[in-house]
Image: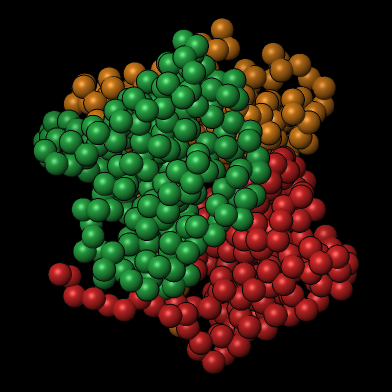
Chain colours: A orange, B red, C green
């Protein structure tokens, strides 16, 4: 069950990576690699940082096969997938919610306190997209756009990390934390909520 | 005491990351993330490479709070901070000295020889800035500019690594090594010393 | 013997990194760092992912000295080296073959199955070049160009990983696997074989 959810999240993220690769005119290998890096990157960074090596994203062939196939599918059917942007956005918000909550819980399992667990949870959620954008030669969307993406991720991860710290069982926490992240993200897309940007200053 | 110095270095580096983020018109989250990546990046890379995971930069909430707050402060007061460029440069040179010497000593503690310890010390000093520039979408300043930045860092790290290898106590070495790096860096800024660039060749 | 081959591969990759740095007008430190990152990057990433830290590329001074010297040599004699592009290409194909096969065998030694070992072998072969291109501020050639580079690397790594999984001794497998990668890569350069690119679609 958990594995299925995890692989679903990887698959959705991989499609987003594949679409960026197609738009940047990368070749078939580039599409597959970008799909894999986007799907697996966040979890692999988290696992390297907490010492959980080799990460499942490297050791388990299913974690490699799912984003590779998602990348090949994106290469083949990208015009159709591109038109499904709204659907992809919904899945992406769901993937973000699952990743950041699962990341925070795994960091807690490895003995980290609530603040680091929340930070690593957010990193799990946004890390794949950051790697995707670096490989595609652009400033990471999550940093740049003013879109509310990482802040909902941090909120869900913080709720999950605080909850397990207070002794609640993960089963109780996962639901509300995922709903918080995914719901906030979907509302932000729908209503056009944006994160504050720095005041522009004249160069003096 | 050591912790205070370390956090001060992280704070200064974080401000430099936040200023780059503001200049690139990233949003508030981007400013905070770039501040954290710049402040913590060098040490985290070193710790991952020597197997010291989870790194303090991930596990200890103070290491997360300091650059996050520095990023928020940069977001709020960047016009004032930007005018303090000279002061920031001095602190940055001090941070560079502390980071590369501390990095070399930590690598030595983990059993590495003098050459790798010196290399990892330099990496600790410049790694955060490299990550900052990659995330901001520009070629790392340390590679590009001809500015004497990494060479003083390597010199200080090499002095520290050689010293402990010869059996000197860290307390004796830290001072001269930091002064070498920081002083050389400050002189390079003041006098405009530059690293040699390749001869330009016509494309034949 | 194995060490010599490994260092030779690192040297060739380092020269390719140094040449990219020279063409991007980086300074002497940039040339050396890019040479080292290109020569050592693939192996270091693999070692971090399988938990083999500190990696030889960090711990062993010879692994640091060879690409550093190659970088300095490139800085000094880049016009001559640039004219030897064909020779560099042959060496690069040989280095690619050795790296991806050695990477797959090392991953197998650390207990990974055939699919992850093949993937890590490919990553060992192409990782250095990806880091080189990111630091030089361009989309990684291996993703972008349509050149057959990563696919031959994956093929050789897959042959090596499957072979050891089936119980063949590494001595038997290394030869054919390296020849497969290197030969395919050389043929692709010579005949202009290219990887398929996505169909261009009008933005609708």
Image coords of residue B33 (percent x, y): 56, 51
Specify whether residue C204 is in view: no
**Do we see residue C2 in this rendering?**
yes
Q: Which residue ends up furthest to the front in the rendered image?
A: C1
The location of residue B131, given as percent across then percent down, is 52, 55
Coordinates of residue A60 in the picture (x, y in percent) = 53, 17
Quadrant housing residue C118: top left
- The quadrant in which the N terminus of chain B is found is bottom right
Identity of the residue furthest to the bottom in this view = B191
Count of marks placed on residues: 0
Judging depth in this view, the residue of A81 and C176 nearest the camera is C176
Q: Left or right? Give the position of A185 relative to A120.
A: left
- Determine the residue positioned at 68% across, 26% down: A106
Q: Which quadrant holds residue C201? A: top left
Say whether residue C47 is left or right of residue B101.
left
Q: Residue placed at 60% from the left, 45% from the top?
A: C56
Q: Residue at x 59, y 20 (%)?
A: C111
Q: Examine the rendered structure and indicate whether residue C86 appears above or below residue C117.
A: below
Question: Residue B18 occupies which quadrant of the picture?
Answer: bottom right
Front residue of A43/B87: it is: A43
The vertical placement of A110 against C19, above or below, is: above
Q: Is residue C140 left or right of residue B5?
A: left
In the drawing, does residue A161 fall left or right of residue B167?
Answer: left
B157 or A34: nearer the viewer: B157
Which quadrant would the C terminus of chain B be assigned to in this image? bottom left
At a point 34% along the width and 55% down the height, the residue shown is: C16
Give C35 or A168, whichever is nearer the viewer.
Answer: C35
Q: Is B172 located above or below residue B33 in the figure?
A: below
- The residue most toward the top is A1
Position in image of residue C72 (x %, y %): 44, 68
Q: In this rendering, is residue B41 above or below B125?
A: above
């Amino acid at each position: 069950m958990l594995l299925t959810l995890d692989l679903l999240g990887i698959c959705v993220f991989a499609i987003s990576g594949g679409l960026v690769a197609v738009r940047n005119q990368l070749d078939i290998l580039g599409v597959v690699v970008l799909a894999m890096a986007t799907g697996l990157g966040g979890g692999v960074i988290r696992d390297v940082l907490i010492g959980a090596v080799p990460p499942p994203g490297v050791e388990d062939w299913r974690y490699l096969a799912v984003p590779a196939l998602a990348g090949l599918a994106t290469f083949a059917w990208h015009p159709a997938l591109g038109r499904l942007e709204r659907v992809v956005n919904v899945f992406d918000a769901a993937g973000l919610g699952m990743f950041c909550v699962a990341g925070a819980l795994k960091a807690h399992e490895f003995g980290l306190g609530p603040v680091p667990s929340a930070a690593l949870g957010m990193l799990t959620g946004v890390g794949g997209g950051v790697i995707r954008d670096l490989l595609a030669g652009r400033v990471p969307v999550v940093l740049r756009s003013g879109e509310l993406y990482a802040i909902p991720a941090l909120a869900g991860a913080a709720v999950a990390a605080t909850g397990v710290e207070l002794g609640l069982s993960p089963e109780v926490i996962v639901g509300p934390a995922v709903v918080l992240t995914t719901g906030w993200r979907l509302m932000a897309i729908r209503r056009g909520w944006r994160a504050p940007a720095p005041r522009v200053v004249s160069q003096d």
